[in-house]
Amino acid sequence: MTQSWQAIRAEAERRMSVGEWRPGDFIPSEADLATEFRCSRATVNRALQSLAADGLLERRRRAGTKVASLPVKHAAFRVPLLRAEIEETGARYRHMLLDQRTEPANLEVQRRMRLTEARDLLHLKTLHLADDQPYCLEDRWINPTALPGLHQIDFAAMSANEVLLRQVPLSTGEMVLSATAATAEDAERLGTTAGAALFELQRSTWDGDRPVTAVRLLFPPGYRMRSAV
């Protein structure tokens, strides 16, 4: 069956969201995609041009088409990409998915996401590393209605931070910065001692009126936050 350009676009977005096409990867040529989807190259071109217009793909004559490192359509509310933040220092980035489960939002998360009831959210805990050293401990809640196909995504392959920046437009957000004392569990994961002063960043984001995510990031002693103004 011949595919419409909208169906091809949707499949391309799915492949990016689950990590089949990763940031910086070159995707198959228009000719190869036309063969795969049994359609004309013009149909494929329209789908890819649509994705490029939204900042999800980068297209260059003769060089090919690749997945954008960070889509420009998400610039309405700036959220740092932790992988890029680490790689900019010259360090090697990787992340470890520590826990993933679906559970009712607690009262604190309901307040931060402005939820009127304790709906089920995806709860993830992730450790981000720079040259295999703990860089940031992430505790995140995601609203399933904000990200289609959420439960098909392999967050061990691509962090929730990166998936959300790639797939969900963020229009508004709230951020709170503070210092906090490391619990025994936090200290073990961040390679420090219980009671050590950690830099804490709490952030909640929305797409219009729809809550997207609430995250708590903990950074070990010595972390320095940089921001351009």
Image (cartoon, rainbow, N blue to C red):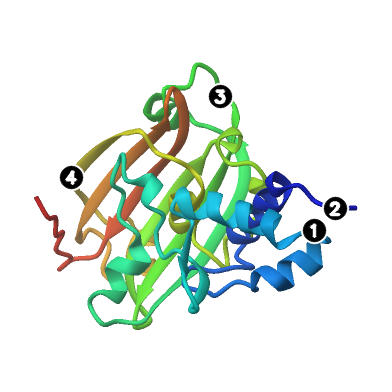
Counting from the top left corner in percent of width and height, residue 28 is at: 65, 73
Label at residue 39: 1
In the rendered image, which residue does mark 2 sit on?
A: 2
Q: Amino acid at mark 4?
A: Ser
Q: Is residue 115 above or below residue 54?
A: above
Other residues around mark 1 within 10 Å, as few (<14) / some (14–19) / many (≥20) = some
Q: Earlier in the sequence, mark 3 or mark 2?
A: 2
Q: CA distance from mark 3 to mark 2?
A: 43 Å
Q: Is residue 194 above or below residue 8?
A: below
Q: Amino acid at mark 3?
A: Ala
Q: Element type at marker 4? A: strand
- The reply to whether the C-beta atoms of the residues labelled 1 and 2 are less than 8 Å apart is yes
Label at residue 118: 3
Label at residue 178: 4
Q: Amino acid at mark 2?
A: Thr
Q: Earlier in the sequence, mark 2 or mark 4?
A: 2
Q: Earlier in the sequence, mark 3 or mark 4?
A: 3
Of marks 3 and 2, the one in the foreground? 2
